[in-house]
Image: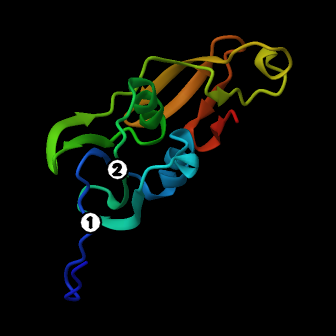
Amino acid sequence: MVNDNKTQEVRAIENGTVIDHIPSDQLFKIIHIMQLDRAPQRITFGLNLESKRMGTKAIIKIADRYCLDKEINRIALFAPMAMVNTIKDFEVIEKRKVTVPERMEGFVRCANPKCITNNEPVRTAFDVLNHDGKISLRCRYCEKVTPQSQMELIK
């Protein structure tokens, strides 16, 4: 690690994934979504890093693991500006901007306590609403709209 009081480097990964441009306040949700707290791979993350576009941002580097499409869709709910970079032999071979999906199932709890999904063994299903980067979910069963700030992940 180099530290000349102006530059700090985080060790590069040979193979794996780098998720960049995560809003700082969403980092730990992304870690939870990807179950990185239980992953055997080497994981490095940075929080409150400078970003010209976002003010501050977070970044995650995961050695020897690549993101599944389903994970990228989930990341998009909490970090719609994120970039997922695939690294092979220390080189970026693919840069993917996350795409906010139109629908999401079985991942987030409906905020309506009377919704059937909270009272019966029914898988949650939402239409994803994206208004200028502000993400919310509309339940397909009860029509309750849940803003991103109130989304609760299903354990």
Residue 56 figure quarter:
bottom left
Question: Can you say whether 10 is above or below 144 in the image?
Answer: below
Q: Nearer the viewer, residue 5 or 37?
A: 37
Pointer 2 local density, CA inside 10 Å: few below 14, some 14–19, many at least 20: some
Query: Where does residue 45 sit, x and y in percent of width and height?
Result: 41, 60
> Which quarter of the figure is the C terminus placed in?
top right
Query: Left of 33 or right of it: where is 54?
Result: left
Query: Where does residue 17 sit, x and y in percent of width and height?
Result: 31, 44
Question: Which residue bears the numbered disc 1?
Answer: 11
Question: Can you say whether 144 is above or below 60 in the image?
Answer: above
What element does badge 1 sit on?
A: loop
Q: Residue at x 58, y 36 (%)?
A: 147
Question: Which residue bears the numbered disc 2?
Answer: 63
Residue 93 figure quarter:
top left
Q: Residue at x 40, y 28 (%)?
A: 68
What element does badge 2 sit on?
A: strand
Q: Residue at x 67, y 16 (%)?
A: 143
Query: Where does residue 126 sit, x and y in percent of width and height?
Result: 58, 18
